[in-house]
Amino acid sequence: MRLLVLLFAFLPITALAQTPAPAPGTPQTDDEKTLYAVGLVLSRSLKDFDLSPPELEVVRRAIADAYAGKPAIDLDEWGPKIQALANLRGERLVAREKEAGAAYLTKAAAAANAVKTDSGLVYVETTPGTGASPAATDRVKVHYRGTLINGTEFDSSYARNEPAEFPLSGVIRCWTEGVQRMKVGGKARLVCPSDLAYGDRSNDDIPGGAALVFDIELLDIVSPSPRAN
C-alpha cells in the first residue's frame, strides 16, 4: 500500500516534467499575442535592410535603449541616413533575387516539355487543353497558384475556392504571353523572370527582383474578343 501511495504521488510530477514549458517570450495571453503582432509589423519595415543576426541585435538594443530613455546615438544626426542605407540594402536584395531567379529559370528551361520564349518566359504545358486559345484582348476565367522559386505560396485561387476572372491585357506580361499559349481545359506552369512579373518592386509577399512560378488552369474564355473571319 505504501508503494502505491508513493507511485500515485509521483505520477503528477512526472507528467508535469514531460510537458515542455513555453519558450521565453512566447505569447500566451491576448495582449501578448497583440504585442507580438506589433513585432511582426515592425519586422516588415526592416525587411529591406537585409539584416544579419548581429545587426538585428543592434536594432533590438536600440529599441530597449529608447524605451529606457537612454539612446546611444543622436537620432537627429543618424536618422537622415536611414533611407540611404535602406536603398543600398534593397539593391543588394534585388541583385540576389535576380541571380537566384536566373539560375532557376535556366534549370526550368532544361526540363522536359519546357519552352523558353524570346521574352525569357519558361512555359511548361502540364495538361493539354482541347478548347480555344485566348487572345491578349480576351477576358479569361482561371484557377491558379503563385509561388516564389523556393516554393512559398503568395497567392492561390484554389485556396480561396473561387476561380479568378480578368482581362489578359490587365495582368503581368508573363500571364498575358503565357496564357495565350494555353487552350481552355488545359493546365500549364509559367516561370516568370522578374522583368515579366513585378520587376524590382517588393511587397509583403514578393521580394523585389523575384522570379515567380504560376500553375494555371484555363477554365474558360469569358468574353472573347471578335475574331476575324
Image (cartoon, rainbow, N blue to C red):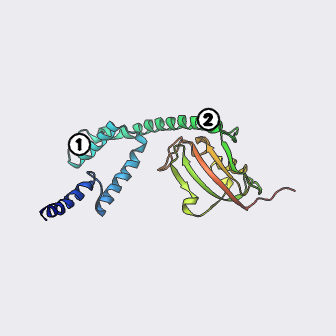
For marks 2 and 1, the one nearer the N-term is 1
Q: Is residue 21 visible?
A: no
Image check: 219 left or right of 79? right
216 and 224: which one is in front? 216
Q: Amino acid at mark 2?
A: Thr
- Secondary structure, mark 1, is loop
Q: Position of residue 161 (x, y in %)?
A: 57, 63
Seen at 55% across and 62% down, the residue is 160
Q: Quadrant of residue 35?
A: bottom left
Q: Residues within 10 Å of mark 1 (few under 14, many from 20)?
A: some
Q: Position of residue 7 (x, y in %)?
A: 18, 60
Residue 51 image position (x, y, % from top left):
38, 39
Given this view, does label 2 or label 1 mark the residue nearer the observer? 2
* Mark identifier at residue 106: 2
Residue toward you, 66 or 192: 192
* x 68%, y 54%: residue: 168
What is the quadrant of the N terminus in the image?
Answer: bottom left
Q: Tell me which amino acid carries mark 1.
A: Pro
Q: Which residue is labeled 1 in the image?
A: 71
Q: Is residue 38 visible?
A: yes
Q: From the viewer's perspective, is residue 63 above or below residue 15?
A: above
Residue shown at the point (38%, 48%) measured from the top left: 43
Asked if disc 2 and disc 1 are in contact, CB closer than 8 Å, the reply is: no
Depicted 1 relative to depicted 145: above or below: below
Q: Which mark is residue 62?
A: none
Name the residue rendered at 29%, 62% in the picture: 31
Q: Among all residues in the image, which is located at the extreme right?
A: 229
- Cα–Cα span, label 2 and label 1: 49 Å
